Every structure is written in structure tokens, then in C-alpha cells.
Image (cartoon, rainbow, N blue to C red):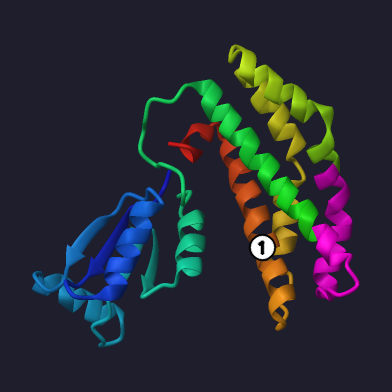
Amino acid sequence: MALPLTMYGATHCEDTQHVREQLTAWFIPFAEVNIDHDAVAEQFVIFINGGQRRTPTLVIGSSDRKTILTEPGDDLLKATLLDSGYVPGYPQNHSVIDDATFLKNILFDIRGCLTTLSGIAMLARDSTVNPPVTMTNWLKKWRPAIETWQQTQDTIRLQNSLSRNTSNGEALIAELIAGLEYVPESAAEARTLSIPQSLLEKELVELALHTIERLNLIYRRLISQEYKQIYR
């Protein structure tokens, strides 16, 4: 389940407006407190920001697990939301969508991630690109699993099955899980990759990290039978 999110903002704060618009665009539910009109909330924000009145301040979670973000950039905000159980860009609220649509969305999302990772692997082999050794080794280890599953005929068969009926949904989910068993270990190794200084290589590494984490999130939701939460 996604953790609760509260944003403490101010009336004329441009950063508050930007984060509000971003959360709305990403379909993220949140509570908003205007500290211009709430003295207690204002003191709370000042306290947790070391004596400074900074907005927006976001509190994600409850007493046993709480994350605080102050004036976050979009990348940090998105990464934190993912870690907190949200999926930025997809509706989080329950809506009337049939199981076939859910499963097709998952399949297309997985294929998109795998295509991205395969493209990164191709770029890393280009002589003009010089990715860090840790990334090169990571790609060498996981590229066969990524490309094999991406190109398998099972993917096409799954897509065709989904377009015909949904009675075999549980079997299809089981096949998706089996095809992604390598993802958790791959994601754990990806988190140890060194981030290079040059812009192109840095963007490649960050894209690889974001993509494998996306796959890992889908995998975790699939095995916990919460796959519908990805698209609701």
C-alpha cells in the first residue's frame, strides 16, 4: 500500500504550486496544508527544517516510516514516491477498468522497460560512449536475460491471449513472474553502479537505474498479487 502524503505549502510559493501540479499530473493523492493559515503547521515546518520556513515540505508516511522532502526536484520526488508505493504517471485511485486492460498495460510497460534496457546496452557498446566499468559489467551479466525475455515468442503469445480473453489471467501473471525472476537481483546490483561525471554516460546510468527499478516495482506487485494497484 502507498504511504500517506501531506504537503505543507504557502499561498504565493511557486515551488508549492509546481509540486502540486506535478503530483496532480502524476495522479498522486495528497493532503495539503497551507501554513499561511495554520500556525501550528507553520511551527512544525520551521522545526523540521532546522529553524527555516521552507515550502513546500512533504511528509510521506507515518510514525513508523516517515520521509521528509523539502523543496524537492522532480527526479527526487519521483524516486521517493516510487519507494513509497506510488507509481507516478498512473491513476492511483480505483476506476472501472477490466482485467484485460490491466494485464495489457502491465505487458506493454514491461516490454517498454526491456526495450529501453536493450537500447542502453547497444549504446554502451558504441565506441564513442565510455560508461563506467561497473555499468559495463552489469550490462554484460544481465543483457542475455533481458534480451531473451524481450524477444521470446511467449511475449507475443501473451499479448495475443490478452486480446482474446481474460479467463487465464492467473496463468499469464505466473508466466510474467517467471520471466522477471532475475529483476530483484539485477536491481540490487544496479543500485551499486557508480555515477559518471560526463553528461551522456551519467544519463545512461540514471536511465538504467530508473528502468530496472520500474521493472522491480512491477515484479514486487505481481508476486504480492497487488498488480492492479500499478494502474489504479
- Residue at image point 53% right, 29% down: 102
Q: Is residue 28 left or right of residue 216?
A: left
Q: Is residue 32 left or right of residue 201?
A: left
- Residue at image point 77% right, 45% down: 182
Q: Is residue 104 left or right of residue 201?
A: left
- Residue at image point 49% right, 32% down: 228
* Quadrant for the N terminus in the image: top left
Tag 1 residue = 207
Asked whether 211 or 126 is in front, the reply is 126
Which residue, as the protein is rendered here, is positioned at the far bottom? 51
Horizontal and vertical percent for residue 156? Answer: 76, 27
Q: Name the magenta segment's main secondary structure.
A: helix
Q: Is residue 132 left or right of residue 12?
A: right
Range of the magenta residues? Answer: 121-147
SS at badge 1: helix
* Quadrant for the C terminus in the image: top left
Q: Amino acid at mark 1?
A: Leu
Determine if residue 96 is in view: yes
- Tag 1: Cα neighbours inside 10 Å, few (<14), some, or many (≥20)? some
Reply yes or no: does residue 55 show up in magenta: no
Horizontal and vertical percent for residue 211? Answer: 65, 55
Task: Please determine whether, in this image, residue 198 is positioned above or below residue 205.
Answer: below
> Which quarter of the figure has residue 218?
top right
Horizontal and vertical percent for residue 10? Answer: 19, 73
> Which quarter of the figure has residue 70?
bottom left
Reply yes or no: does residue 134 show up in magenta: yes
Asked whether 219 or 156 is in front, the reply is 156
